[in-house]
Amino acid sequence: MAKTFKDLIVWQKAMELAVGVYSIVRFLPKEETYALSDQIRRAVVSVPSNIAEGHARQTPKEFVQFLCIARGSRAELETQLLLAKTLGYFECVPAQQLERVFQLSDEVSRMLYTLTKNKESLTANG
């Protein structure tokens, strides 16, 4: 097991996702500063934060609980990003940069799912 949460690849990817999201959120219209923009930032920060908090907990069961919260935040984030994209808010974002954010989001999602399942099987078996 990783010694600290910083050793977890999924946490590292989630942090990379957060940086990427912050770099595109600045393109949202000013009228979204206190609405969609804030929601997106809260959701993306929640992903690595919950991974870290779960890792710091005492049992695999608690870790799974926080991984599930991180998975939910990641899904919330994707929904908000898709909404902003559909509304045309990211038209000024370079396509490659936007694609990278969506790619990282998918990667983090898969990694969280796998880690959750692995931890759940440990909990069930021991």
Image (tube, rainbow, N blue to C red):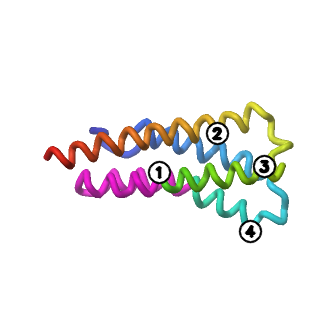
Q: What segment carries the magenta color?
A: 45-70
Badge 2: residue crowd in 10 Å (few <14, some 14–19, many ≥20): some
Left/right placement of residue 72 relative to residue 66 reads right
The image position of residue 73, as x and y in percent, is: 52, 56
Q: Residue at x 72, y 38 (%)?
A: 98
Q: Earlier in the sequence, mark 2 or mark 4?
A: 4
Closer to us: 83 or 20: 83
Please name the residue that numbered disc 3 is placed on: 86
Q: Are marks 4 and 3 in contact (CB under 8 Å)?
A: no
What is the number of the mark on residue 102?
Answer: 2
The residue that mark 1 highlights is 71
Residue at image position (44%, 38%) is 111
Please state the horizontal and vertical placement of residue 67, each as a whole percent of the image: 39, 51
> Pointer 4: what residue?
34
Question: Magenta stretch containing residue 123, yes or no?
Answer: no
- Our reading of the magenta stretch's main secondary structure is helix
How far is the residue under mark 2 from the one under mark 3?
14 Å
Alpha carbon separation for disc pair 4 and 3: 19 Å
> Image check: 95 left or right of 123?
right
Seen as rendered, the residue at the extreme top is: 96
Q: Quadrant of residue 118?
A: top left
Secondary structure under tag 1 reads helix
Upstream in the sequence, badge 1 or badge 2?
1
Q: Could you classify mark 4 by the number of other residues whose Cα lies within 10 Å: few (under 14), some (14-19), or many (20 or more)?
A: few
Q: Are marks 1 and 2 in contact (CB under 8 Å)?
A: no
Up-down relation of residue 99 to residue 48 (above or below):
above
In this rendering, would 13 be left or right of 1?
A: right
